[in-house]
Image: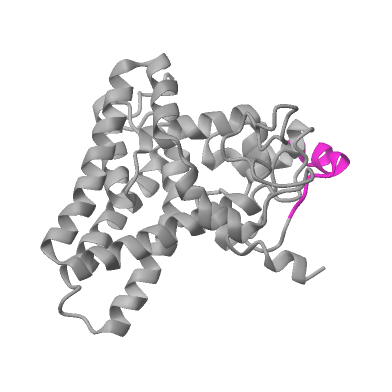
Amino acid sequence: MKKSPRFLFAYSYWDVIPAVAGVLHGLYLIIILLFFKQLPFWANLILGFIYAFSISWNVNGISHNFIHNAYFKSFWLNRLFSLLESMIMGFSQTMYEYVHRQHHIGNNDRLNEQGETIDWISIYGFGKNGEPEHPIKYALLSYFRDDPKRIYGLIRKHSLWLANFAIFEVILSFGFIIGLFFINWKLGIYYVFFYYLGHSLSALNGYYEHYGANPDKPIAWAVSCYNKLFNILWFKNGYHAEHHYRPKQHWTKMHELHVKIKDNQIKEGVKVINWPHQIGFMQSKTK
């Protein structure tokens, strides 16, 4: 008997979970901004740190899976969700998608003879003597190293419409931030601080997804963590070596892929850590 086509979702009905989580993330941001003036300093501080941490969670879970396998069958629903994510985290998701494509082309490559990397966010990009950059420096400076003009040019080669949509996402995102300063300069500073911290935490997460991996072996391009709770909350992002080996594998199938290639992973020395990537620095303290 022929299966009926899926309604609304392009790949799996399981995608309703990250999609709804993205909407709830947006509601959380609206709530903390609306109640900023009414809440005491300590409460705003706690909520701000949660928002910062949630940016890393969204970028590396909800958004990451979305840019690899768009959730919806409708082109316009996907663009609407992309716009929502851009507003929640203050940067263009379309640009993020193309930077991430470049990441998968280079796969955290080392510096070449010209002193460059194919992967624009490689941890070796600003390292010295063939070593990765220090994680704190990488985390704190990554936000300022994006080149919007270069990213726009890459998108434009594929689609002028998407390139212009990326600019639209940037304008709305930064317009939202500027608007916060007009409403209340303290609110603007509050948002920008935790917004920047969130992107730094996301970069730190990315650092430990590749620190200790082997850029010369496709099966070992990244570092995995199989902590069950982490992979439930981060939508299987812990299976990162598997993800780089098969980037289009849907997040619900990552464990299945791991089982299939596990023997080869062990043979090729794929690095596995016990701690989630967000706190990957803990691994060195346990060895």
Residue 185's quadrant in the figure?
bottom left
The residue sitting at the left extreme is 183
Q: Which residue is drawn at 40% across and 63% down?
A: 52
Residue visible at 76% across and 65% down in the picture: 284
Relative height, residue 103 to residue 272 (above, below): above
Q: In which quarter of the image is the N terminus?
A: top left
Most extreme residue toward the right, as rendered?
267
State whether the magenta stretch is mostly helix, strand or loop.
Answer: helix
Front residue of this view, candidates 27 and 209: 209
Judged left or right of residue 204, residue 20 is left
Q: Where is residue 117 in the image (x, y as percent from the top left)?
A: 65, 32
Count the marks.
0
In this view, the residue in front, 233 or 55, is 55
In percent of the image, x 64 and y 60: which residue is there? 227
Queried whether the magenta region covers residue 22, the answer comes back as: no
In this rendering, does residue 71 appear at all?
no
Q: Which of 225 and 213 is in front in this view?
A: 213
Query: Is the image coloured rainbow, by chain, by secondary structure, or in one colour?
Result: one colour
Residue 205 is left or right of residue 44, and the answer is: right
Which residues are the magenta region? 261-272
Q: Position of residue 167 (x, y in %)?
A: 28, 31
Between 152 and 48, the one lying in front of the other is: 152
Q: Residue at x 61, y 41 (%)?
A: 254
Across and down, in percent, residue 286 comes to 78, 71
Q: Is residue 25 left or right of residue 216?
A: left
Q: Is residue 285 visible?
A: yes
Quadrant of the drawing holding the C terminus: bottom right
Q: Where is residue 201 in the image (x, y as percent from the top left)?
A: 50, 59
Q: Quadrant of residue 230?
A: bottom right
